[in-house]
Amino acid sequence: MQVPDQPNSENRNTDLRSDSLFPAFDSKNPPNPQLIDACVHCGFCLSTCPSYRVIGKETDSPRGRIYLMDGINEGEIPLSPAIAQHFDSCLGCLACVTTCPSGVEYDQLIEATRAQTERNHRRSLPEQLLRKFIFATFPYPKRLRVLLAPLLAYQKLGLQKLQRSLGWLEKLLPKQILAMESLLPNLTAQSFQDNFPEVIAAKGEKRYRVGMLLGCVQRVFLPEVNNATVRVLTANGCEVVVPKLQGCCGALSHHQGQEAQTLELAKQTIDAFADLNLDAILVNASGCGHTLKEYGHILKNDPDYAAKAALFSQKVKDVQEFLDRVGLTAKLSPLQDRPLTIAYQDACHMLHGQKISLEPRRLLRQIPNVQLRESIDAALCCGSAGIYNILQPEVGHELGEMKVTNLTDTGAQLIASANVGCITQIRKHLKLQNKNTPLMHPMELLDYSIRGQKL
């Protein structure tokens, strides 16, 4: 497509036609033409874009998608199924934002475009049903637990192991459903209950009073990570407040353009943590943390919540970011008698979204005998990206294969990752590659070290 001239912003807005013969962007927050104009089409984003790396098409790169956004804004391109699939292929990993020399705010562009796509693009019936199922289930822990209850029996009776060895379901179920089954973690009784009191006292002298987000999928899939996080915080002088009314933060919905649900869940989260006199609101999943820090932007047009959201976001910290800043006071013991090599995996919304990279590494290096190793292509997305590995299973699968190969090629004895999506994705591909390298959240490693428990 020929790059159009640079008409002014006023003219572009008049080109937004919802009554066209073809679907188009509507007038509610279309991709900002000024942000589009910041892209000089240099191509630096191509080498860091995971979807371009796998698919190899210009239209599946940040630069190509910006061309398409501009064309739809101009009324030159319809929001057709063929065009919408290029927006769907974006993982939202934000690697292009980090690498862009022009400072293009692609995160704002794809956020606006995804919301437009959800409003104005009619998906096929199977796509609609799958998305409605996901957004009616995953953000709600009680509903998710009801869904997972029969799957607990499926695992404990050995049916999962038998099915995976024989491949019974491969010819019967859609690939997206198979992708969900393949990501299912080992469920335990803890997956079906929240046992935290609302206030958990600090061990020794209280230094801080912090709130903790349990997460929607995190509390069900990885309850051991929340348990470890509470123990680490209390051992380091933090009184931990766990509001009973908290639910999903809205990250899953936000990353897929589900505006109404995102706003509802964000407001509920703000209300759950209101008036608790907290020094910080801590989160141990990077995808959630990035969205929580964006509440001020997400709710900027809400007259009742704009100010509250901005104040809320200012208090949000990733738990590693917080502990690195305030310092560890608990004594740390070696995790094994000989040196332990760890490959730390940077979750995209930690590295590119929150610009947190050194903090987790500094914490891990404080554990005696720990040595860190870095993988090649460390900043490349693992393919999880929220629910991307379900909605786009082929691309997600190839990225997962690459990530696990790169991590295990370091020769590290253990992998550390700080995001529930990354953990489930990488564990899946470790099994598929018959690799027995353990993977743990950094909070689990600190918890083991504080309690003097060997791996």
Image (spheres, rainbow, N blue to C red):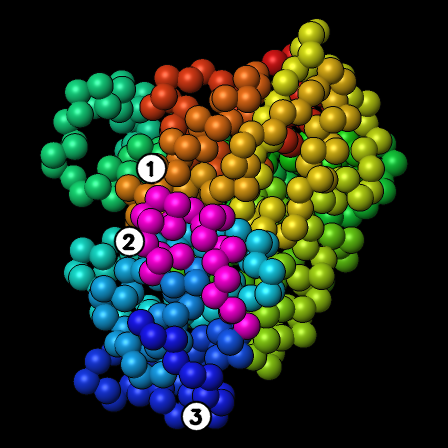
Q: What stretch is highlighted in magenta?
A: 38-61
The structure residue drawn at horizontal position 17% and vertical position 60%, both measured from the top left corner, is: 125
**Above or below, 331 relative to 60:** above
Residue 310, by quadrant, is: bottom right
Query: Which percent across, then down, holds residue 361?
Result: 70, 33
Residue holding disc 1: 397
Task: Answer whether residue 264 is magenta in the image.
Answer: no
- Dot placed on the residue nearer the N-terminal end, 2 or 3: 3
Residue 34 horizontal side relative to residue 198, left or right: left
The structure residue drawn at horizontal position 50% and vertical position 21%, both measured from the top left corner, is: 409
Question: Considering depth in this image, is 95 or 443 the residue closer to the camera?
Answer: 95
Task: Answer whether residue 48 is magenta in the image.
Answer: yes
Question: Considering depth in this image, is 349 or 401 the residue closer to the camera?
Answer: 401
Quarter of the image for the N terminus: give it: bottom left
Q: How far apart are marks 1 and 2 (CA)?
A: 22 Å
The structure residue drawn at horizontal position 54% and vertical position 42%, both measured from the top left corner, is: 379
Residue 237: mark in rendering? none
Q: Nearer the viewer, mark 3 or mark 1?
A: 3
Tell me which amino acid carries mark 1: His
Quarter of the image for the C terminus: give it: top right
Tell me which amino acid carries mark 2: Phe
Q: How far apart are marks 3 and 1 (CA)?
A: 43 Å
Q: Which of marks 2 and 3 is in front?
A: 3
**Above or below, 340 relative to 416:** above
Residue holding disc 3: 11
Q: How far apart are marks 2 and 3 (CA)?
A: 40 Å
Residue 133: mark in rendering? 2
Query: Do tag 2 and tag 3 residues touch (Cβ < 8 Å)?
Result: no
